[in-house]
Amino acid sequence: MNQPEGVTNDADPNAITIDAARARILERLSPSNIKEIINASSALGRVLADDVVSSIDVPPFRASAMDGYAVRSSECDQILTLAGQSLAGHPGPDQMPEFTAQRITTGARVPDDADAVVQQENVTRNDTTITIHKAPAPGLHVRNPGTDSAQGSVLLKAFERIGPTERALLATHGTTRVSTIAKLKIAVFSTGDELVEPGHQRRRGQINDANRALLLSMLDESCVELTDLGIAADTEPALEEIFEQASVADVVISSGGVSVGDADYVKQVLEKQGRMDIWKIAMKPGRPLSFGQLQSGSAFFGLPGNPVSAAITCLLFVKPAIDHLLGMKPNHIPALSLPLQGHLTKNPGRVEYQRAKMIRNSDERWAVTTTGVQDSHVLSSLHKADCLIELPVSSTGAADGEQVRVFPFTHFSRGAL
Ligand code: AMP
Ligand code: MG
């Protein structure tokens, strides 16, 4: 690789790319097929297990799209006599004598004999008659049955996630029960003798455990059931015990204990109870990541201990794995391209994610700037950030004004960060 003089290369011949690591993970995980039938009213965020077929036409009848008059379009060059009315929820008669019009409101049933609705603004009304300024084309302002969704059509597909729109679609069809993928069981724990439960007495050399608060929050979605297993000390018996407790979960996530110094602990213990690989991933932060399986079949992720590394590896590897286990297609993250404000330096050899903030300049154009210190223990610069700048493997940095790739957090994590 050509590189400017004086630039250190961060490439590690044993490192694998982010895409390769993710592909290896997904390859080893089979989507869940456990179904659960639940009330549609509590299905927000859940994943459908089966297609939902429309049981009715929506709209269910010919409905007016305007406040005005229901007419026969062929008669509109004549003065029409008003006869009856059709209001939303209070339909009028379906039959209309010749040369009559029915007063109609938005959402009301259009009489069978009418083929158009004339907007009230386009009509001169005298006591009991109307004169229409411009004859409507047949079908004007009439919503036909099934034009939103037709009876018998697939309304929602299996493995789609139920969001607000999907709940509303189910509601318009009167669907109150849905077949979903059962909640995925996820267990989370931290490792490290230096960690203390927040609120407990901190002895010399100890820090409060931040990663469980972070990971449990990032993973908190209605399609999963979280178990907080606490903190495991850096000893074999402590780790053995916690893995034992974790084995009922579908996915087990730990943080810490996988960097070179103490990696062997988690690895040694896990190898007695399953298998584990430690991968060096060509990324910063988050180079060491371990992935494996417990004997029980649970998937295991050993995330790096530094909180920012744990957050980014959770976004890039754990979240897609959860989506995959729930049967969903990998969520391709849409990126923005924004001009950089300030400049960034970087060694080539790995992809780098910089915590950053999008800014709207006085000319209404958007730009992006880093949130400062990027060390992977600095949670406060993640707090200040609303996006990540991605600098590719070969990049040696970016100059002021250069376009860079930006991933807003909401795109990544459905608002979980
Ligand atoms: P490790 O991967 O265990 O070597 O940890 C790397 C760094 O992350 C060390 O400075 C740890 O103290 C820190 N760390 C590990 N786990 C946590 C945690 N749960 N909360 C906050 N910092 C942590
Ligand atoms: Mg540790």
Image (spheres, rainbow, N blue to C red):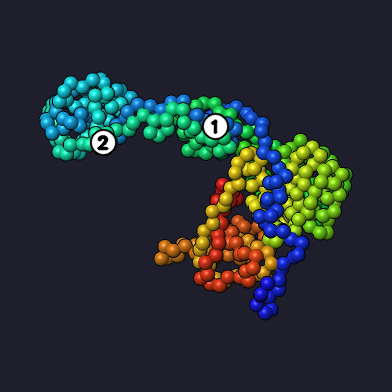
On the picture, is 228 further left or further right than 403? right
Where residue 69 sits, quadrant-wise, is top left
| Residue occupied by mark 2 | 140
| Residue occupied by mark 1 | 51
Q: Kindly identify the amino acid type of the residue bearing the numbered disc 1.
A: Asp
On the picture, is 113 further left or further right than 362? left
Work out how far the residue at label 1 is from the one at label 2, CA to CA, in angstroms. 34 Å
In terms of depth relative to the viewer, which is nearer, 97 or 272?
97
Badge 2 crowding class, 10 Å Cα cut-off, few under 14, some 14 to 19, many 20 or more, is some
In terms of depth relative to the viewer, which is nearer, 187 or 319?
319
User: Residue 388: x, y in percent?
Assistant: 59, 59
Where residue 33 sits, quadrant-wise, is top right
User: Residue 138: x, y in percent?
Assistant: 24, 34
Circle 1: element type: loop
Badge 1 crowding class, 10 Å Cα cut-off, few under 14, some 14 to 19, many 20 or more, is some
Residue at position x 56%, y 48% in the image: 415
On the picture, is 350 further left or further right than 101? right
Q: Is residue 373 above or below residue 128?
A: below
Task: Answer yes or no: is residue 51 visible.
Answer: yes
User: Residue 403: x, y in percent?
Assistant: 52, 66
In terms of depth relative to the viewer, which is nearer, 330 or 161?
330
Q: Kindly identify the amino acid type of the residue bearing the numbered disc 2.
A: Leu
Residue at position x 75%, y 58% in the image: 280
